[in-house]
Every structure is written in structure tokens, then in C-alpha cells.
Amino acid sequence: MAKPEEIYRKLIYATARNLTPLAVMCNLTYRCPLRCAHCYATDFTPGAEELDLAAYRALFDELTAMGTLFLTFSGGEPTLRPDLLDLLAAARERHFAVRLFTGGTLLDEKLARGVGALHPLAVEISLHAATPRLHDEFVGQEGAWEQATAAARRLLRHDVRVVLKMNLMNFNYHEFREVYELTRGLGAEFRYSPYLSVTNDGGTDPLPLRMTDEHLREYFGTLKELVPGLAADGDSCDEEIASPFRYNARALSCLAGFNNCSLDPYGTVWPCVSLPIAWGNVREQSFAAIWEGREAARFRQLPDVPIEECAGCELDRYCFRCPAFALLEEGDIRLPSREHCRVARAAREVLKRPLRR
């Protein structure tokens, strides 16, 4: 009998081949009370009117007809939307599995109770440190750490699956183990990433926060201790299931635009939240017309574009090249992502060594 993870992988790749929009991220607003220095979200049309509840209901009806299963509500800070519970209810009425991304500072008991009653797939809260002062200084708001962890506890009491997320940076990498242990102590799940991108308009303000090579080696060493049996080979999904996707040696090395996409708060559809390549706007066209349109078709030719420098690279099994990094940092989606090369080099150096006891 096939394992659940194998069935899920088959679903992922089958929907990509069939061009089914399995997962859609809705950035409900770019407004946010926090000022996180690593934030990549760029508002290309400041002052524009956000999509209202009626527009989202119409969108959800279209997505239902097209086979979408997963919705993610993000931002900015989505809890700033006064109609958030109505949006969640509209999504759940259509049987979408919904994730909510939040900083957690505005998620009080009333909102936690309302979210819990709608049974989302998960609520994911960003937590940047185990030390409250470090987190608060980074997000620019005193008391934010206490509010975020309190929000996690409230949601867990209402039987909501909670994920705490940590971006590893040069100011917090040394607290990786502590945040991991804090998360487990709360009864939440932990998600983490060593990658830090430029902003969606190419701004480089986040880059000074990247870990050094030494920081990366320390991070991978800690990760190896915390996750016994860690596989450095990445996705082990067999070739028959994954084909023709997941090739670092091709310009599009992910499924963006094939079975998932993103909408900004004003209705513009992008192949990915990190790829600012506009396909169209749901205020002017149906989502189906955009998904099946000329811009989307042009984008989907990218997997056929080879990247000679990546073909046969010795770092391939440690590398998860992101085409958005290539586009925004290297200026061309058809180039290697030097940052992913750097992270992969550190991963290979550490993960192939025996674990020190």
C-alpha cells in the first residue's frame, strides 16, 4: 500500500502536468504593524483598493470549479482585515484546506476562537528568536514575542495546528536549537529556512542579514544533530513521478505557475509570491482566462530552457535552486542562483561528515 507522502507527491506532480491550480496563495493586504528587516513583500500599487469579500467569494467559486484544494491567506498581516473570519468561512464552505500566515501580534482570544471554529489546516506564525528582546528588536515592536507565543498557545487550546517559522539570519542563527525546543515544548510544529531573498522589486536591504559561511556550517551542524538520519539528497521522489520537473539544470526548477500561484491584495496573479511576473488581474479577466492565458503559457516554457552551468554540478543533491533568486539577484531566471550555490556548498561540507558527539 502506498504511503501518504507518496500519494501526496503523486498528486503534486500529476496536477503540475495537468495544469491544475492545486494551491493558491492570497495576499490579503500589504498592511502590517511590524517592520521586519527581511520582508520581501513589495507593494507595486500603493494606495490601491484591496479585493473585497465579494470578489474573493467569486474567486473561490472559480477555484473550486478548477480543482483547487489548498488556499493560503498571507500578507502583510492578514489579521488586519476586519473580514478575515468571513474570508476563512467562505473558503471553508467550499471545502478548501486553508493555511493562515501571521506575525501573531493581533491574534487575540476572540479571533483565535473564531479561527479554531473554522478548522484551518494550520496557522503559521513567524518567530525569529527564543529571546524576546531579539525578536522584538527585529520586528520593531516591543512585546511582539510575548504576543506571538501567546497567540500560538491560544490557537493550540482551540485545537488548531500551529507552525512556528524561523528564517535563519546572522543575528538569530545561534538560537536555532532554542527555538526548536521552544516549539516542541509548546506542542507546535517547526519550519525553518536558511534562505533570505531580496525584496520583490530587487531591493537589497535584507541581504546584510544573511548568514556567513561559518554561520551556515554551524546551522547545518545543529540541524544534523536535531534531525537524526537527515537525508542530504533532497526530494527522493522517483523519477517517473517527478518527471519532467525538479531539475536544477533548468530555468524553472520548481512547480510555480504549474499547480500553484499567488494573488496580490489587488487581484494581480503571479506564478509565485516571489516571482513578480504579472499574468493578469481578476478584476479584468476571470482567473481561468489568466491561468490559461498567453503570459502563463509563455512562462511555462521555462522548464525547457537549460542552465549549462548547473547541469552535472557536484552540489546538485544539496541544492534547491530558486528561479526567483536567479531573476531578482542575477538578473536572469536562466542563470544559477549564487546564494543557493553558497548554501549548498555549506550543506555538503557538513552533512557528508560524521556527526560529532
Image (cartoon, grey):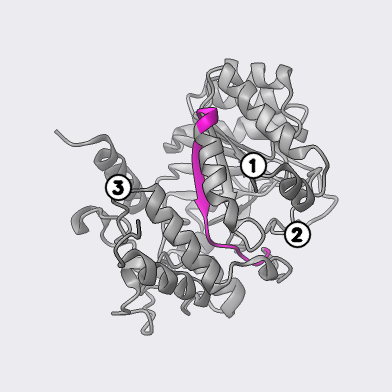
Q: Which residue is mark 2?
A: 44
Residue depicted at x 50% and y 41%: 190
Does the residue at mark 3 contact the one at mark 2 (Cβ under 8 Å)?
no
| Crowding at mark 1 (Cα within 10 Å: few <14, some 14-19, many 20+) | many
Which tag, 3 or 1, sits closer to the chain's start? 3
Task: Answer above or below: position of 138 versus 336.
Answer: above
Residue depicted at x 54% and y 36%: 183
In front of the other: 247 or 313: 313
Q: Which residue is mark 3?
A: 14
Circle 3 SS class: helix
**Which residue occupies the extreme front position in the image?**
357
Which tag, 3 or 2, sits closer to the chain's start? 3
Circle 1 SS class: strand
Q: Quadrant of the C terminus?
A: bottom left
Q: Quadrant of the N terminus?
A: top left
Visible in this render: residue 52? Answer: no
In front of the other: 296 or 173: 173
Mark 2 vs mark 1: in front: 1
Circle 2 SS class: loop
Amino acid type at circle 1 is: Ser
Amino acid type at circle 3 is: Ala
Amino acid type at circle 2 is: Phe
Q: Which residue is mark 1?
A: 74
For the record, the magenta segment spans: 185-199
Q: CA distance from mark 2 to mark 1?
A: 16 Å
In the image, taking residue 80 as reference, residue 125 lies left or right, namely left
In the image, taking residue 82 as reference, residue 329 lies left or right, namely left
**Which residue occupies the extreme right position in the image?**
47
